Image (tube, rainbow, N blue to C red):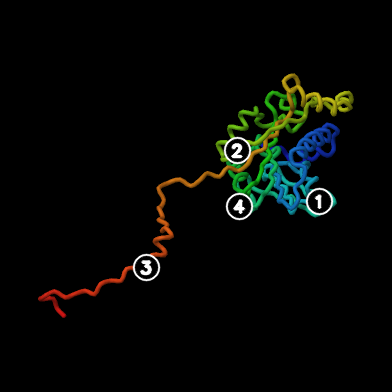
Amino acid sequence: MHLDVQDLRNFYYRSALGRAAQRAVRNRVLRMWPEAQGQTVAGFGFAAPLLRPYLKDARRVIALMPGPQGVIPWPAGLPNVSVLCEEMLWPIDTGRVDRLIVMHGLETSENPTAVLDECWRVLGPGGRALFIVPNRAGLWSRSDATPFGYGRPYTLSQLETQLKRHGFLPERHAAALYQPPSARRVWMKTGAFWERVGGRIPVIFPSGVLLLEASKRVHAPTGPGQRLRVPSPLEVLAPKPVPEPSVGRRGDPA
């Protein structure tokens, strides 16, 4: 079940732990996608905190927020780009999105199949999608104090399998949120340290979220079809035969 948009806004914009989480995840996203010059960038769920760096150079930025979650105007102080939508029907033409970020939109959905189908539909040729989900092995998925403690957490292999079933090709993955999900000062002050250490030895320090980049896989058409015969150059240049005049047989009408 989707979280309420007010709770998500309060966490990411009005709490110290939420701002730290926003910073850690956004930094990781920018390492994977440093710019989006002239591209159409969309986010589904509550991906707004990650879209702000692309407002300046992207051709268009759209923050899609599902109906069960609710919507808020975003970004503050700028023309609104957030849209309330249905999970199974996004107000975007097929193949119009170049970059898609999904956060708090897949693991909390009651119909993840429909969400992935829409993700596949709106991506254009060469488009990329970035799915950000709670890590099943991490501490953040076990804490109700953060939005990552709700919904279905994933392992990397589970997420890859689900994306492959819906026509996506996993390309590369990353992780973020190695610091404990606690607002205590000692953890907040050492957050950057835990992000560096956790990235080097993830086996000992599992991340709070997984990031998986995938491309849209388009299958070649199959079936018998219709075979076309292309004439050779000699056949094209050869003179056409002249039909012989017909000769009437005895008894044939004139």
Q: In this view of the protein, which residue sits in the foreground, 155 or 17?
A: 155
* Left or right of residue 184, residue 126 in this image: left
Which disc is residue 90 wearing?
Answer: none
Front label number (3 vs 2): 3
Q: Secondary structure at mark 3?
A: loop
**Residue indicated by mark 3:** 239
Indicate which disc, 4 or 2, sits on the residue closer to the N terminus: 4
Q: Residues within 10 Å of mark 4 (few under 14, many from 20)?
A: some
**Residue indicated by mark 2:** 169
**Residue indicated by mark 1:** 56
**Residue indicated by mark 4:** 94
Expressed as whole percent of the image width and height from the top left, the position of residue 177 reads 77, 29
Single out the residue that lies furthest toward the bottom.
254
Q: Residues within 10 Å of mark 2 (few under 14, many from 20)?
A: some
Expressed as whole percent of the image width and height from the top left, the position of residue 244 reads 25, 72
Identify residue type, mark 4.
Thr
Q: Residue at the location (40% across, 48% down)?
A: 224
Q: Residue at the location (68% across, 48% down)?
A: 98
Q: Residue at the location (67% across, 37% down)?
A: 213
In which quadrant of the rendered image does the C terminus lie?
A: bottom left
Q: Secondary structure at mark 4?
A: loop
Cβ–Cβ under 8 Å for marks 3 and 2:
no
Query: For the residues marked 1 and 4, what is the alpha-carbon distance in whole angstroms?
Result: 24 Å
Identify residue type, mark 2.
Leu
Q: In this view of the protein, which residue sits in the foreground, 228 or 40?
A: 228
Cβ–Cβ under 8 Å for marks 1 and 4:
no
Q: Secondary structure at mark 2?
A: strand
Query: For the residues marked 4 and 2, what is the alpha-carbon distance in whole angstroms?
Result: 19 Å
In which quadrant of the rendered image does the N terminus lie?
A: top right
Query: For the residues marked 2 and 1, what is the alpha-carbon distance in whole angstroms?
Result: 29 Å
Query: For the residues marked 3 and 2, what is the alpha-carbon distance in whole angstroms?
Result: 53 Å
Res. 93 image quadrant: bottom right
